[in-house]
Amino acid sequence: MSYACLLILGFGGHARSVADVALSSGMPCLRFYDVSARVGEQFNDFPAIAILPKALPDGWAFLPAAGDNYAREQQLDWFAADRLATLVSARAYLGIGASVGAGSLVAHSAHLGPAVVVGRGAIINTGAIVDHESSIGDCSHVSVGATVAGRCRIGRRVMLGAGATVRDGRCIGDDIVIGSGAVVVSDLIQPGVYVGVPAKPLQRASAKDGVRL
Ligand SMILES: CC(C)(COP(=O)(O)OP(=O)(O)OC[C@H]1O[C@@H](n2cnc3c(N)ncnc32)[C@H](O)[C@@H]1OP(=O)(O)O)[C@@H](O)C(=O)NCCC(=O)NCCS
């Protein structure tokens, strides 16, 4: 990775985790973009800018860093595809034949087993495990400490909450949220929010608008 500067699209908690991985990988220069950044706002001496440049200066790359999967998906196209960075912590493990798509982050202490495929714009967060031959779809997020066992298929824009577990060989469809600590033991296809052990659709005690996910 030899960029003159990395433009991190976001200035929230996830953007700061991205910065930490970038700096520990030896990135010399960072900029954050946040439309509501105030003059002088910075993180670790690197400024946040509120106006997006029309084009990236020579040698710069960008990384989508919105925590929200849908927002991050939009950010993938903000600049030319050949400027899209991919960030893998030097303290992560990538097994033989594992691949990580453009615009994705693999954070510290994450573990990708052999032949794992991670799509574009995905987050494999701190300490997450994705085991052998599993796939993680575009713009999905495997949160801190979550575990995806071997030969699982995780769709696009899936949010696996902190510490969630997906049993080996299970499939999760697109646009599904798995709550923190849940254990997925069967295939989940219907978009929605699932929680608990085993993971079931979230039943809200007070359905303000009558909608039950
Ligand atoms: C599941 C989740 C998406 C629901 O969020 P929400 O729609 O805002 O739901 P609420 O917090 O209003 O909780 C709704 C109900 O679900 C329950 N609930 C929420 N999260 C739960 C979880 N992880 N497991 C079990 N029950 C949960 C609440 O107790 C509440 O129950 P009640 O209606 O009986 O009072 C969210 O709680 C969650 O787990 N998000 C993952 C966050 C995360 O891991 N981030 C990591 C970033 S690295």
Image: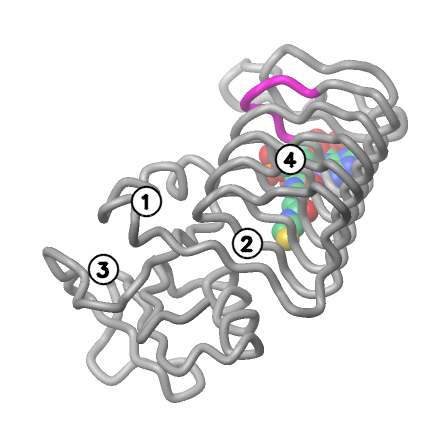
The amino acid type of the residue labelled 3 equals: Val
Asked which secondary structure carries label 1, the reply is helix
Residue 174 sits in quarter? top right
Answer above or below: position of 78 versus 200: below
- Ranked by sequence position, the earlier of labels 1 and 3 is 3
Part of the protein shown in magenta? 172-177
Alpha-carbon distance for marks 1 and 4? Answer: 21 Å
Q: CA distance from mark 2 to mark 3?
A: 22 Å
Of the residues tagged 2 and 3, which is closer to the observer? 2
Disc 3 target residue:
35
Helix, strand or loop at mark 2? strand
Residue 109, position as x, y percentages in the image:
75, 63
The residue under the point 57% across, 44% down is: 100
Q: Which residue is mark 4?
A: 117
Taking the view exactly as shown, the residue that stands out farthest to the top is: 190
Q: Is residue 15 magenta?
A: no
In this view, the mark in front (2 or 4):
4
Q: Residues within 10 Å of mark 4 (few under 14, many from 20)?
A: many
Who is closer to the viewer here, 184 or 114? 114
The quadrant where residue 202 appears: top right
Q: Earlier in the sequence, mark 2 or mark 4?
A: 2
Q: Residue at x 46, y 67 (%)?
A: 1
In the image, taking residue 29 as reference, residue 213 lies left or right, namely right
Residue type marked 1: Gln
Residue to which mark 2 is pinned: 105
Give the residue pinned by disc 1.
75
Q: Earlier in the sequence, mark 2 or mark 1?
A: 1
Q: What's under tag 4, amino acid-wise?
A: Val
Q: Position of residue 17 (x, y in %)?
A: 55, 66
Percent coordinates x, y for residue 126 in the rendering: 69, 59
Q: Residue at x 24, y 63 (%)?
A: 36
